[in-house]
Amino acid sequence: MAARLVKRCACLLREATLLAPVVAPVGRLRLASVAHRTLTFSATCPSSHFPGPLSGLVEKEQLSAPCPEHQEVERLIEKATRPEELLELLSDGRCLQESHAALMLIQLSRLLSDKPEDRASLVQDARFQQLLHLVDSQISAVWHGTLVKLLRSLYALALPAACRELRSVEQEVRWRLRRLKYRHLAFLAESSATHMRESPELLAELLLHLERRWTEINDGRTVVALMAKTGHLSEPLMNRLEDKCLELVERFGPDELRKVLVTLAAQNRRSVPLLRAVSYHLVQKPFPLTKGMLLDLAYSYGKLGFHQTQVLQRLAADLLPHVPSLTSGEVARGAKSFALLKWLSPPLFEALAQHVVDRAHTVTVPHLCNVLLAFAHLNFRPEREDKFFSLVNEKLGPKLRSLHPALQVDVVWALCVLQQVQGEALRAVLCPELHARFLGSESPKDQSTFQKLLHISATAQLEHPEYTGPLLPASDWAPGLLACDGKATLLQKELRDTLRGLLGSPSRGSFAVATQYVWVLGEALPAIPCWWARGSFCPGQGTNKGCHSLRGQTPTTDEAKQGVRQPCPTAEGRHWGHEAGQASRTSLQKSNHAPSKMLWH
């Protein structure tokens, strides 16, 4: 610390002597005052802003020396349009200051930003290597702002990770992290975080300083940029940034609100307080939203599954006038976003369907598939459905077999939902060559495709009697169907245990029976005489006629032969059969699986 203090004092005295011929005698007193304040206020922070009229001048002069020759070098660096002009400055014998070599490297990276083919040849140039050695020898004299830009430029020039000069600059940045202003840290994170994977120590320390000094953020642009660039790298930092975003959200404009939502969607972070705050300001403030913003907002809400009625109403209403100017890709993206939210705006979707019909020659097959799937998820059929579905059959019919197998199943499933499927499409996806690859797969995506195949097979049997095949063979899909039906709930287990104890033999009842229409029945029992059930069942409904309670009343011979099974609704005859039926229905309402029905023969 003492060595840095002495070095700082020497630097100030040297600059004071350089400025003495330029500044009036009164300026000498001001410089002395500046030096005194520096020693007492921020001796270890050379980039601090000092109060007084010369604070900006002193900070500027550290980067721009008063020597006319130095000013000429800086002017040539700024006006250079070719890398050769910058490299010639080294061989012209000009007097280069400490920061000039760093400024030359920064300008080189700018000139070669859109010319990646020239970077390899530049790295092999001897003058470029000389420039790197010069920067390495003067790195401790480069000021903070120039240093962070220098590191960004070296990353942009694609220097090897083991380059000595690059490692030297990274080490210097690590030493100065505590003294850098927060805007310098944010600049490093925004511009260089993706390149710091080869130096994890520097990245870890940068994220740590960003997290500890998060209260210094005072503008929306910084917090939004940090959320997008570094939020996924550090969970604690992202939590701090979300808190700061909640604090500053009132100052955000529409573009910043859009960036916040897109960042949350990209990182799949469903921060409900932040989503509510953003939604409130989108509803309350009459922001002018472009079609790009509207589509991004709809996508973000759909990706996060956040349903806010007023926001969705505004998005749909504001997007409707932009429909004629949308491309086919934007139409598919908007329809898919609203479908994820299960939000149907009939005027908007009618306009989207008409847009697809009017521009049929520009609609590609993938975009048409996305629109069709969105309509199926919302069960939406346009008013002019004949034209729309004729276009679908015309576009997708010849190319259906050339699509990816999973996409083929999705398209035919959507047509089944919209009741527009044809026999040729059914045969295309129900053939053994296609559905065999999805049987027995454990991936969630393949299991979802398998479920859709079951729905398609049931549709072919129930709604298309003229369809002759092929169908899914029961030996292939029955085990998979039972597996997809899910595990039984606790209430279902208790019910089945009770039924097993009552039946006495496993051959007298079955559980989880897969039907030919891909429907799983929870319990299937044969006809059981009431007298065998010890008076547990009460034929008759609504009255006490034929009601047999637990007192042991015996049914008539006709009733015993018919095996009628109807629970008694009376309070006296309410027995386990009635209560089990009510419990079974309650469990089905709470279950996410297909209804488990009790079948009495």
Image: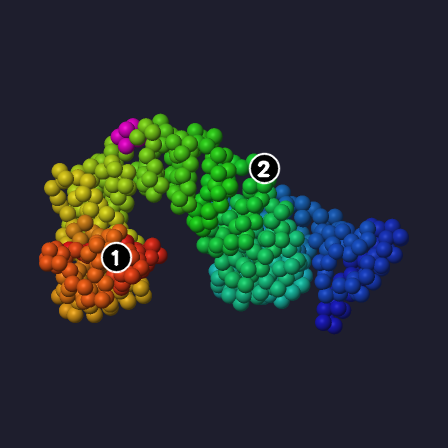
Q: What residue type is labelled 1?
A: Cys
At horizontal 48% and vertical 54% (from top left) the residue drawn is 270
Mark linked to residue 488: none
Q: Residue furthest right?
A: 25
Q: List x then y, in percent, for residue 124.
A: 49, 55
Q: List x then y, in percent, for residue 185.
A: 61, 58
* Along the viewing direction, whichever of 430 and 187 lies nearer the viewer: 430
Does residue 425 appear to the left or right of 276 in the view shown? Answer: left
Provide the residue span drawn in magenta. 386-391
| Residue position for label 1 | 568
Mark linked to residue 286: 2
Taking the image as drawn, is residue 277 in sight? yes
In the displayed structure, 538 sits above or below 366; it is: below
Q: Is mark 1 on a helix, strand or loop?
A: loop
Taking the image as drawn, is residue 441 in sight? no
At horizontal 45% and vertical 51% (from top left) the residue drawn is 304
For mark 2, does the 10 Å Cα neighbourhood hold few (<14), some (14 to 19), or many (20 or more) residues?
few
Magenta stretch holds residue 487: no
Q: List x then y, in percent, for residue 312.
A: 48, 41
Q: Which of marks 1 and 2 is in front?
A: 1
Marks 1 and 2 sit apart, C-alpha to C-alpha, by 62 Å
At horizontal 27% and vertical 61% (from top left) the residue drawn is 573
Quadrant of the image for the N terminus? Answer: bottom right
For the residues bearing labels 1 and 2, Cβ distance under 8 angstroms: no
Q: List x then y, in percent, for residue 33.
A: 85, 59
Q: Which amino acid does label 2 sit on?
A: Pro
* Along the viewing direction, whichever of 407 and 309 lies nearer the viewer: 309
Does residue 523 appear to the left or right of 162 in the view shown? Answer: left
Q: Earlier in the sequence, mark 1 or mark 2?
A: 2
